């Protein structure tokens, strides 16, 4: 057992982080050693496990043995997010604002109360506003002696140059399907056949694979999304397909939001000692309203992410068609749909398929740029039917 067990398909990164954690253990004892720095930037595509790797490294830094044993109280509490010297920023809304960063900086300048290091994980450093990033810069540049910043972002380019130049880079890749399937079987007890399907259908996205394997509704919504390309025959059907796509993404976002919202509300009430039927303490309504405000902001992000995930599935559909058209010897993402894909490949050309893939990628960029979801989807489906 080790804190690195869930860092899937990243042997090079794990080796680098293990060595740094060992150096950090020596640094705590006052020995000057190379290999450890106070600011790290984890990059990799969605699903590569950036935040998982950052948390595992945070646990290894706190580990009493300095290895990330996964069994000591420091490892366990860090992985659970309850260690007193761990701060995790998990973006609820569309951006991380300067007030949030000022609170982080305040934490960063505290000495560790229990562990070896004050560790701060920023899971979405690419969502820092410019003002927030500038507020963070000085502390990343000149951190307290026992503070470690662990920033996560999809790419290096999405982080302010002055910040990334002061960080040590850890580049993650999309994990191979067999590695994702293995962790679903080992960690979550998923049936091997279902795990293999979920790993392939998620295109290596670990969190998405776990959801597909465990949630039949998620699998049904994905199947609905994959019906979009075949349903687009003319302008009218393209408009209907766009509306259906947005409705499916909205349904997915609502389910995810409701699950998170209910757990957060219950956690707040429990932390205040409020049980079923108990009298609510004064001031609780204000806290509940603040929580609801944060949850609404998160829903906007969740809807955008759900639609983007649907667009990735459609891009994967056309990628499979292009694979068949070119006779490439690579596995299909949607192999269970092979007859449908083969028919579509015969009726089209590689050039038309590439244009459709470009239309999907443009829709993803539009959604990320905050274009209205339905407008972005309609533009895409019209391009799909035009070929």
Image: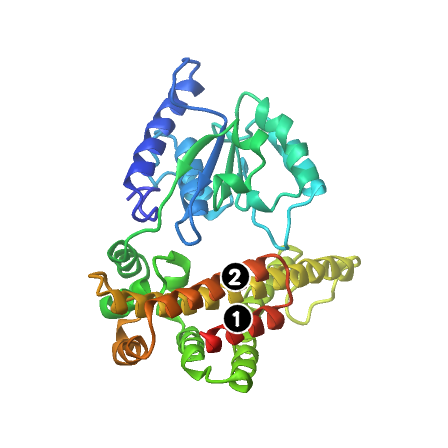
| Disc 2 target residue | 362
Where's the C terminus, which quadrant? bottom left
Where's the N terminus, which quadrant? top left
Residue appearing at x 21%, y 65% in the figure: 327
Disc assigned to residue 141? none
Residue appearing at x 70%, y 40% in the figure: 98
Q: CA distance from mark 2 to mark 1?
A: 8 Å
N-terminal of the two: label 2 or label 1?
2
Expressed as whole percent of the image width and height from the top left, the position of residue 86 reads: 53, 38
Residue appearing at x 69%, y 68% in the figure: 278
- Describe the element under mark 1 as helix, strand or loop: helix
Q: Are marks 2 and 1 in contact (CB under 8 Å)?
A: yes
Expressed as whole percent of the image width and height from the top left, the position of residue 46 reads: 44, 53
Disc assigned to residue 380? 1
Q: Nearer the viewer, residue 205 or 72?
A: 205
Question: Is disc 2 surrounded by few (<14), some (14 to 19) or many (20+) residues within 10 Å?
Answer: some
Dividing the picture into quadrants, the one containing residue 324 is: bottom left
Res 351 seen here = yes
């Amino acid at each position: 057992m080790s804190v690195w067990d869930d860092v899937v398909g990243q042997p090079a990164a794990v080796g680098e982080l293990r060595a740094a954690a060992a150096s950090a253990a020596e640094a705590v004892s006052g020995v000057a050693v190379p290999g450890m720095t106070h600011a790290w930037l984890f990059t990799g595509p969605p699903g590569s496990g950036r935040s998982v790797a950052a948390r595992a490294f945070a646990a290894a830094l706190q580990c009493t043995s300095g290895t990330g044993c996964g069994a000591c109280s420091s490892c366990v509490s860090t992985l659970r997010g309850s260690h007193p010297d761990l701060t995790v920023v998990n973006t609820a809304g569309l951006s991380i604002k300067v007030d949030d960063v000022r609170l982080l900086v305040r934490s960063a300048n505290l000495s560790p109360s229990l562990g070896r290091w004050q560790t701060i994980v920023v899971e979405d450093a690419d969502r820092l506003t410019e003002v927030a990033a500038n507020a963070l810069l000085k502390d990343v540049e000149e951190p307290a002696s026992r503070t470690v910043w662990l920033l996560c972002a999809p790419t290096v380019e999405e982080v302010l140059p002055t910040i990334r130049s002061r960080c040590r880079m850890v580049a993650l890749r999309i994990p191979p399907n067999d590695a994702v399937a293995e962790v679903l079987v080992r960690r979550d007890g998923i049936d091997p056949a279902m795990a293999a399907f979920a790993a392939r259908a998620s295109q290596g996205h670990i969190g998405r694979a776990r959801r597909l394997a465990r949630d039949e509704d998620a699998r049904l919504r994905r199947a609905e999304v994959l019906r979009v390309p075949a349903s687009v025959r003319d302008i009218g059907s393209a408009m209907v397909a766009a509306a259906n796509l947005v409705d499916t993404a909205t349904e997915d976002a609502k389910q995810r939001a409701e699950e998170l919202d209910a757990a957060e509300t219950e956690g707040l009430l429990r932390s205040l000692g409020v049980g079923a039927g108990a009298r609510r303490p004064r001031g609780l309504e204000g806290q509940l309203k603040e929580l609801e405000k944060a949850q609404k902001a998160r829903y906007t992000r969740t809807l955008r992410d759900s639609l983007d995930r649907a667009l990735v599935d459609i891009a994967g559909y056309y990628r499979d068609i292009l694979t068949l058209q070119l006779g490439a010897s690579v596995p299909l993402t949607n192999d269970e749909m092979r007859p449908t894909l083969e028919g579509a490949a015969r009726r089209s050309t590689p050039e038309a398929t590439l244009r459709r893939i470009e239309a999907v990628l443009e829709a993803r960029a539009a959604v990320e740029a905050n274009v209205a979801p339905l407008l972005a989807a309609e533009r895409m489906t019209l391009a799909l039917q035009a070929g």
